[in-house]
Image (cartoon, grey):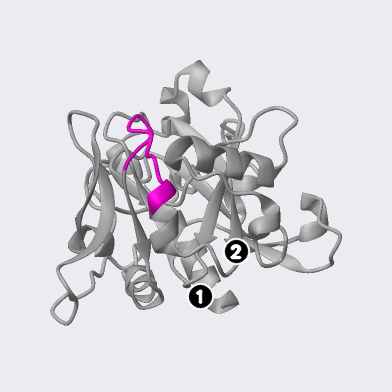
Amino acid sequence: MLLPEKGSLNKLAVMRDIMLCSRALGDSGNYFLKMKRPSFCPITNLSPDDIEQLPSEIGNRGIDVGAAVILESSDNKILLTRRSKGLRTFPNVWVPPGGHIEQDESFVEAGLRELREETGLDIRPHQCVSSDLNVLALWESVYPPKLNMGLPRRHHIVVYLHGKLTSDLTSDWLNTKMKLEPSEADACAWVHRDLVKAIVSAKEEVGNTVSTSDMPESIRGLSVDESGVQKECDIALEPLLRVCGVTSQVERVSTGTKYALEEWLQLT
């Protein structure tokens, strides 16, 4: 975790809505990417007293880097997974497949490896419309996500990648290949565009939720039961439209995921 020197602010802590040139990420083009974090980001709001209370193993940890895949099926749906309840960070939260980047891995290699490990889907870059996955946006992620939930324990920069799959890779067909890893993800669902719009309209900054009166109560998805059996099921819609509450284990779509989905909506 990158923290300020005592009594000062580090450069990362004062960045907001930064525009990063894609060349810094190894792309050959000359376009720009957004990097963002919420106004309630704990790193931004740490006081000198907070910093003094951080254990040395946390304060000196550094910033981790992760890759997450906004995987779009050929029928224009996005795959979201629910992180398992036993995970140390963001348990029970809905996110796209993703995780840490290992040594000598590219963002795409890491994202597709995590996708395979969590869902069993073995996707290759040539199966995407552009023959590759493209960097969509960057997000500064801190856990717990708010200071009233406790001092920061993990600090990441998440690189969101987008891959639109070719015409034969529909969400229904991909579900037949899905094999969730229960220790990582215990449920998943393919989310259509209108639901994505509803998800991103539930703004964390102002705490508003979305009315579900004109929506179905659930969507079809997959889940793993307590005995480890994967089955098709109804996924309740209401948790997907929640905002971050007073505890870190509230079932919801993560704030960073909402940001990435909003960028996807603008892209498409």
Would you say 28 lies left or right of 57 here? right
Amino acid under disc 1: Leu
Dot in front, 2 or 1: 1
Q: Which residue is at 80% across, 52% downward?
A: 24
Q: Position of residue 197 (x, y in %)?
A: 38, 76
Amino acid under disc 2: Asp
Label 2's element?
loop
Label 1's element?
helix
Q: Which residue is at 24% across, 49% downward?
A: 251
204 in relation to 227, above or below:
below
- Which residues make up the magenta segment? 176-186
The numbered dot on residue 265 is 1
Q: Is residue 255 visible?
A: no
Mark 2, Cα crowd under 10 Å, few <14 / some 14-19 / many 20+, is few
Q: Main secondary structure of the magenta part?
A: loop
51 in relation to 193, above or below:
above
174 in relation to 265, above or below:
above
Q: Which residue is at 25% across, 70% downward?
A: 208
Is 204 or 181 nearer to us in this picture?
A: 181
Is 93 or 46 nearer to us in this picture?
A: 93
The numbered dot on residue 17 is 2
Q: Which residue is at 61% across, 29% downward?
A: 62
Residue 178 lies within the magenta run: yes
Q: Quadrant of residue 228?
A: top left
Q: Quadrant of residue 200?
A: bottom left
Mark 1, Cα crowd under 10 Å, few <14 / some 14-19 / many 20+, is some
Q: CA distance from mark 2 to mark 1?
A: 18 Å
Q: Position of residue 230 (x, y in %)?
A: 26, 40
Q: Position of residue 211 (x, y in %)?
A: 18, 76
